Amino acid sequence: MAKSLEKELKELENIVRRLSAEELPLEEALELYTKGVEISKSCDELLADARQKVEMGKMQLEGNRNDME
């Protein structure tokens, strides 16, 4: 199942909120922090994929424009 950037960001926001607002046991705080880092990396990958798709789309549009000239 494909990950949604919006869902990942919402989960990351929840983790940050919990870490900021609650007095958590150290072990639980470390687990949340680790999960947050993993989600952050996942978001970076999703954004990189999106950037690549945008760039490919731009190149295709430019190629189509050049073909029409």
Image (cartoon, rainbow, N blue to C red):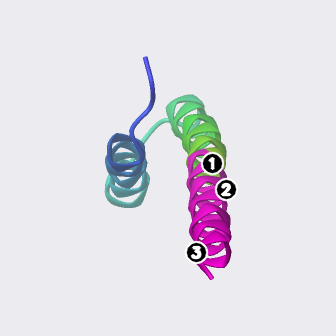
Residue drawn at x 59%, y 53% as measured from the top left:
53
Q: Residue at x 51, y 31 (%)?
A: 28
What distance separates the C-alpha of mark 1 from that of mark 2? 5 Å
Q: Amino acid at mark 1?
A: Asp
Which residue position is annotated with label 3?
68
Q: Percent x, y for residue 12? A: 43, 48
Q: Is the residue under label 2 in contact with that under label 1 (CB below 8 Å)?
A: yes
How dense is the environment of label 3, judged by Cα within 10 Å: few (below 14), some, or many (20 and up)?
few
Residue 61, image x and y in percent? 56, 68
Question: Which mark, residue 49?
Answer: 1
Q: Which residue is mark 2?
A: 52
Q: CA distance from mark 3 to mark 2?
A: 24 Å
* Three-letter code, disc 2: Gln
Foreground pick, 56 / 62:
62
Mark 3 touches mark 2? (CB < 8 Å):
no
Q: Range of the magenta residues?
A: 46-69
Mark in front: 3 vs 2: 3
Does residue 48 belong to the magenta stretch?
A: yes
Label 1 Cα neighbours within 10 Å, binned few <14 / some 14-19 / many ≥20: few
Q: As shown in the figure, which amino acid type bears the numbered disc 3?
A: Met
Q: Which SS class for mark 1?
A: helix
Regarding mark 2 in the picture, which secondary structure is present there?
A: helix
55 on left or right of 36: right
